[in-house]
Amino acid sequence: SMHRNRGRRNMGLFSFESKQVKEWKKLAKSGDMDAQYHLARAYANGKGASQNMKKAVEYCVQSAEQEYAPAQALLAHFYGYGKGVEKDYGEMIHWGEKAALQGYAKAQYNMGRCYEMGKGTEADMEKARRWYTLAAEQGRPDAAYKLGQFYEHGIGVEEDMEKAEEWYQKAAEEAVEEEITIIEEEKKDIATIKQEETSFTQTGNVKISLRRKCLVGIFTCSHITFAIERNSFFRLFPP
């Protein structure tokens, strides 16, 4: 299409590569999977190089085929969102699971999401819980938060408020150390959340108060964008 050609012509004008990218390219040629992975990210994000999804996917595949878990997880992401490739949930699961089985926490969390949402696979809450547990045990606050929900509502597991509280607590503590990005649907500032927390506590709704407490903990951390779902649950996504 004309639009695409115009974009390509402009690419030449703004094409640049940082020293770091040039260094990675040398290493990537000799098969360095870490360098290949970093190039995939650089081209995908347009950081240190002009954005180029074709190159991003090529480097990502080279790295992923060497069984490099971060690249496998990134390739799963590309397939899940149709970035530089046709959207393909089957491929997303294929590469995501490879990374998750190697113990890569981000991929373990994402596998939990796939089984919870039934994306690319049958929804299976018990499997979702198992993947979330593996990720949470490696200190991912979003996975710990999910487990809090699962135990609070008895999803894929017996309802257990004590365990829910433990996981919510863990999520709140770990979120302080780790930046979390949450898809934006509706912005609320921390003051509003704290206000709601107070009013929930006053109505004596223990469950909701518990969740709020954890989330006030999370949201008092810096660098966090957040959103509130229509049903007032929080949905956390991997960065």
Image: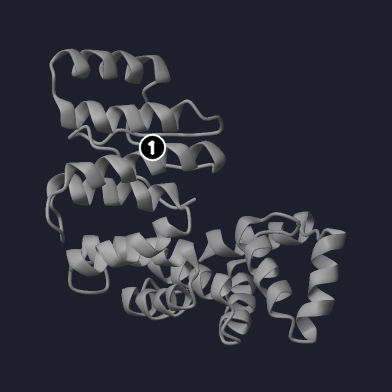
Residue 146 or residue 35, whichever sits in front: 146
**Which picture quadrant has residue 40?**
bottom right
Q: At 47% across and 59% down in the image, what residue appears?
A: 138
Q: Secondary structure at mark 1?
A: loop
Is 103 left, or right, of 153 in this rendering?
A: right
Q: How is the image coloured?
A: one colour
| Residue 127: % across, % down | 24, 69
- The residue where tag 1 is placed is 184
Q: At 19% across and 66% down in the image, what residue appears?
A: 126
**How many C-alpha atoms fall within 10 Å of the one at disc 1: few (<14), some, or many (≥20)?**
few
Residue 231 or residue 152, whichever sits in front: 152
Is 30 left, or right, of 65 in this rendering?
A: right
| Residue 112: % across, % down | 31, 63
Q: At 54% across and 59% down in the image, what residue appears?
A: 3
Q: Is residue 177 above or below residue 10?
A: above
Can residue 183 be seen at all in this image of the molecule?
no
Can residue 172 be seen at all in this image of the molecule?
yes
**Which picture quadrant has residue 217?**
top left
Q: Is residue 16 above or below residue 229?
A: below
**Which picture quadrant has residue 120?**
bottom left
Under mark 1, the amino acid is: Glu
Residue 224 or residue 46, whichever sits in front: 224
Is 12 left, or right, of 119 in this rendering?
A: right
| Residue 144: % across, % down | 36, 49
Residue 128 or residue 114, whichever sits in front: 128
Q: At 69% across and 67% down in the image, what residue appears?
A: 38
